[in-house]
Amino acid sequence: MKILSSYQIKKLEQDCIDHEHISSIDLIEKAATSCFNWIIHHKYLLTKTLKNIILLVGTGKNGGDGITLAKKLYLYGYNITTIYIVNIANHESNEFVIQKNNIIKYGINIEYIYENQTFPLFNNPYNTLLIDAIFGIGFNRPITSIYWISFFNYINNQNFSNVISIDIPSGLLMEEEKSNMAIIKATYTLSFHFPKISFFLPDYADYIGKWYLLNIGWKENYVNNIITKYFFIDKYMISKIYIKKKRHKFTHKGTYGHGLLIGGSYGMIGSIALASKASLKTGIGKLSVYIPRCGYTILQQFIPEAIVQTDNHDFFIQKIPLSFKVNSIGIGMGMGDKNEKTSNAVKTFLLYQKKYENIPIVIDADAINILSKTLNFVNYLPYNTILTPHPKEFYKLCGSWKNDYHKLEKLKTFSQKNNIFCVLKGAYSIISTPDGYLYFNSTGNPGMATAGSGDVLSGIITSLLSQGYSQKEACIFGVYIHGLSGDIAAEQKSEESIIAEDIINYMDQSYQKINNY
């Protein structure tokens, strides 16, 4: 699914108006109808006898959406206490005026809020649904007025039972690095067709709440003509990747590749064990594991399907054989980053791979930490290598960022400059590619924030590379099925009780779901 800029969405709207013989009023009607249908479908938000509704609307098209929604809810039988027109812009669009005039005849209380007047008092806000339709995607500069900043903060402190924002929480900038002190905090954001990039950024999670995409009938051919480098990984994208790799009758283990995982140290053999089991459960044909000697018995017992090779040292890896006849390599899980011999072994191995081999590599965990301590560490990275850092590891690689938009720019630059793939782990794990694309994952839950979850992901991606997925496909499919397995685990257990091995154990159900896409 494409993620579009505000400019692209406005162009898409205009294309619909120009070529489909519909008006901007028709689009407002479609938007309001989709929001209305969502609200009455989620009946727990409102009961006709117990809850009231107030609206904050601006004077542009988003305000027109809000007023039209208010009319539909009123005619359905809900109590619209007041529509407050928040007059920040001091200008009313034609669409807004038309919708305002249409609702006046119903006798709904409408009040203007002007700058420097006393804030309105709300009766029983805890028993009231607030609908926010002040600003839409056209909002492009921070609010600087002390009055309006105070007003937004006042609204956020009212403890409304729920707050629904239409398209985007008012005051939130879609794709700007500029900070804004005035943003409505939504419980739910009802957005149209496409997610906004701010929905995926931790800085704005408290404002967006839980977001939903609503269809308002934009034609697919107009969407297809828009070029973007930002994508949200959805079922359609996954089915296109997976269908090419579905298994055929006359295949054997060699068809699905031979992978190698390198890692482990005394007390941390569990990391490489989890990565190994995840790799096999993802469908690799054959797996070798290179570990220190202390892990030999553990690996043979925990995952007997793996071929175990050991270093000469008992407790850590001190020398890695340079050449392996494998289809993919994953390195770093549980390896430790304090031992100089281990660090030198990792760097020597990577330099050899860069110069002489053409094997896809996944670099994770302690291997990332080892590289981050090294001046000019990117010189050790073979082209198209996949790095899988969490935010702290990414900070070690690239330094600090001013805000989440700046972090995205650093991520893109890092991949493009060094010709590598980077999987920045977390909620909506972000994949950056050497050609400047960003992919945001749609699966996963907070229960996956648990030790070993990242090791499982590295094993999954290494397995997919061995099976013939490209680096981009392995990253996209890998983060998706990893998150999907975690989602199934959360459904069957709870977010609090998930451990990394649960993610592995639900891989079979994830594949069953994907087979039905």
Image (spheres, rainbow, N blue to C red):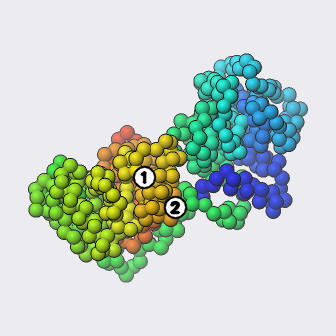
Q: Amino acid at mark 1?
A: Leu
> How far across and how far down the image is residue 76, in percent?
77, 36
Q: Quadrant of the N terminus?
A: bottom right
> Which image quadrant for residue 352?
bottom left
Mark nearer the N terminus (1 vs 2): 1
Q: Amino acid at mark 2?
A: Gly
Residue plotted at (71% across, 29% down):
53
Q: Looking at this view, is 203 or 163 the one in front?
A: 203
Q: Which residue is mark 1?
A: 424
In what element is the residue under mark 2? loop
> How far across and how far down the image is residue 203, in percent?
51, 39
| Mark 1 touches mark 2? (CB < 8 Å) | no
Residue plotted at (34% across, 77% down):
255
Is residue 277 visible in the rendered structure shown here? no
For marks 1 and 2, give the one nearer the viewer: 2
Give the side of residue 127 with respect to residue 72, left or right: left
Give the side of residue 207 with respect to residue 249, left or right: right
Q: Is residue 292 above or below residue 53?
A: below
Give the side of residue 235 with respect to residue 273, left or right: right
In what element is the residue under mark 1? strand
Binning the other alpha carbons within 10 Å of mark 1 as few (below 14), some (14 to 19) or many (20 upward) gives: many
Q: Which residue is mark 2?
A: 436
> How far across and how far down the image is residue 4, in percent?
63, 55
> How far across and how far down the image is residue 9, in percent?
69, 54
